[in-house]
Image (tube, rainbow, N blue to C red):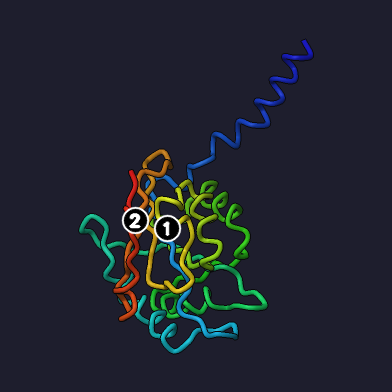
């Protein structure tokens, strides 16, 4: 009797988690970028970084998936910290152009919390996340992707700024595609090639 009671309590505790685990990601595309170029010291963007941030306006205005243009629904950036405002600054021109507010409620280390929030509630069909490169592998893993399949040795290189990770989820909120894309926005992007498959089923 005690065992049955304990089992019922455990099921009641767990069932909401499983029931709503991935509903927020149903038929969703999540795009993940690193913040734009940074100086040797300081919490801001370099002039080249500012150019990249400005170029994202046209880049995402013309971005297509399967030949169809997309409209971004939500912008996330890692919260400002003592050492960096770069994720927010990277998305600022895009925010102004689209009228979308930049959601900065999560710090760079709160990648699990961000992933949980995306699974729990829909934030639209197309979501853009701008993060710090050191935590992007953990963020990808939290979103169900394998960073070892997308990044060299599972890490985002320090010198690379022009990549984007595209994650696509099916009508059950399960990850069905993970792809690394070279943005080709800036001259240095052309050299950011590594021997990786870049795409997984």
- Secondary structure at badge 2 equals loop
Which residue is the site of mark 1? Answer: 151
- Other residues around mark 2 within 10 Å, as few (<14) / some (14–19) / many (≥20): few
- Other residues around mark 1 within 10 Å, as few (<14) / some (14–19) / many (≥20): many
Q: Which of 102 and 164 is in front in this view?
A: 164
Which residue is the site of mark 2? Answer: 196
Q: Which of 57 and 156 is in front in this view?
A: 156
Q: In which quarter of the image is the N terminus?
A: top right
- Secondary structure at badge 1 equals loop
Left or right of 79 in this view: 51 = left
Identify which residue is drawn at 41% across, 38% down: 172
**CB contact under 8 Å: marks 2 and 1:** yes
Q: Which residue lies furthest to the left in this view?
A: 67
Percent position (x, y) of residue 42?
60, 85
Q: Which residue lies furthest to the right in this view?
A: 2
| 43 relative to 167, above or below | below
Of marks 2 and 1, which one's residue comes earlier in the chain?
1
Q: Quadrant of the C terminus?
A: top left
Q: Which residue lies furthest to the bottom in this view?
A: 47
| Cα gap from disc 2 to disc 1, whole angstroms | 7 Å
| 116 relative to 108, above or below | above
Left or right of 136 in this view: 59 = left
Numbered mark located on residue 143 in the image = none
Identify which residue is drawn at 64% across, 78% down: 83
Percent position (x, y) of residue 131?
52, 67
Percent position (x, y) of residue 111?
58, 57
Left or right of 13 in this view: 30 = left
Percent position (x, y) of residue 105?
61, 65
> How many marks can you see?
2
Identify which residue is drawn at 45% across, 77% down: 36
Identify which residue is drawn at 48% across, 87% down: 46
Q: Quadrant of residue 53?
A: bottom left
């Amino acid at each position: 009797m005690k065992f049955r009671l304990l089992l019922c309590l455990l099921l009641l505790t767990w069932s909401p988690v499983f029931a709503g685990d991935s509903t927020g990601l149903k038929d969703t595309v999540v795009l993940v970028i690193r913040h734009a170029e940074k100086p040797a010291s300081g919490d801001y963007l370099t002039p080249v970084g500012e150019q990249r941030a400005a170029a994202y306006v046209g880049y995402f205005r013309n971005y297509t998936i399967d030949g169809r243009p997309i409209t971004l629904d939500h912008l996330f950036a890692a919260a400002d910290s003592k050492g960096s405002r770069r994720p927010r600054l990277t998305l600022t021109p895009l925010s102004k152009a689209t009228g979308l507010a930049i959601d900065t409620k999560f710090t760079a280390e709160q990648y699990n919390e961000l992933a949980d929030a995306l699974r729990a509630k829909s934030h639209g069909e197309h979501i853009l996340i701008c993060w710090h490169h050191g935590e992007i592998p953990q963020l990808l893993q939290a979103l169900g992707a394998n960073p070892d399949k997308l990044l060299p040795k599972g890490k985002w290189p320090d010198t690379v700024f022009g990549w984007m990770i595209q994650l696509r989820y099916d009508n059950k909120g399960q990850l069905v595609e993970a792809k690394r894309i070279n943005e080709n926005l800036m001259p240095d992007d052309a050299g950011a090639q590594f021997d990786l498959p870049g795409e997984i089923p």
